[in-house]
Image: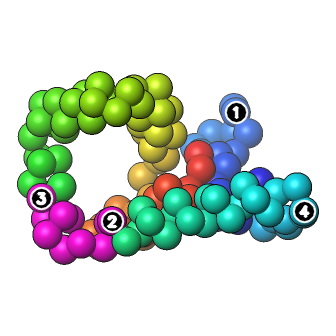
Amino acid sequence: MAAGKVRPAAPGGGQRRPRIQATHSNANDSGEEAHKQQLGQAAAEFASSVTLRAQIIRLCRRPRLVVELLAEVAAEHRIGASIGAKLARYDALDFETLRAVGGDVVPLAPLHTVRP
């Protein structure tokens, strides 16, 4: 599991609690890890825009607009499955996990690295 990934406790164990696991990298993972690092860096740069964050905060107050925006981007770039998978991953993050990594406030922590 890559660094920064969070896993919930075993099913039936009551309330889900994040467990952050340290990992190691080997030669086979180096290309994939480099790609993930580049994506993370690009996402962080995109999210660092003050104007963009303000627009997103306003937009999120109107869920219908968020749905329409994601549907438009998905259709335009033919990435509906990718957006669906990312939505499912983010939706699986509970509030305690978000709070633990600072993702419950703006400015946002880079949540693309957090795994349920």
Q: Could you classify mark 4 by the number of other residues whose Cα lies within 10 Å: few (under 14), some (14-19), or many (20 or more)?
A: few
In front: label 3 or label 2: 2
Residue at horizontal 76 percent and vertical 59 percent from the top: 31
**Picture coordinates of residue 18 (x, y %)?**
62, 55
Q: Nearer the viewer, residue 78 or 93?
A: 78
Q: Is residue 18 visible?
A: no
Residue under circle 4?
Answer: 27
Residue at horizontal 17 percent and vertical 30 percent from the top: 68
The stretch drawn in magenta includes residue 50: yes
Find out whether the residues at labels 4 and 1 contact each other: C-beta distance under 8 Å.
no
Q: Nearer the viewer, residue 99 or 49?
A: 49
**Picture coordinates of residue 29 (x, y %)?**
82, 57
The quadrant of the image that shows the N terminus is bottom right
Main SS of the magenta segment? Answer: helix
Residue under circle 3?
Answer: 55
Relative to 56, does residue 16 appear above or below in the rendering?
above
Q: Amino acid at mark 4?
A: Ala
Q: From mark 2 to mark 1, how far is it between C-alphas?
A: 36 Å
Find out whether the residues at labels 3 and 1 contact each other: C-beta distance under 8 Å.
no
Q: Secondary structure at mark 2?
A: helix
Q: Earlier in the sequence, mark 3 or mark 1?
A: 1
The residue stretch that appears in magenta: 46-55
- Residue 11, disc: 1
- Give the quadrant of residue 98: bottom left
Q: From mark 4 to mark 3, how far is it between C-alphas?
A: 41 Å
Q: Earlier in the sequence, mark 4 or mark 1?
A: 1
In front: label 3 or label 1: 3
Residue under circle 2?
Answer: 46
Q: Amino acid at mark 2?
A: Phe
Q: Earlier in the sequence, mark 4 or mark 3?
A: 4
Q: Is residue 26 left or right of residue 44?
A: right
Q: Secondary structure at mark 3?
A: helix
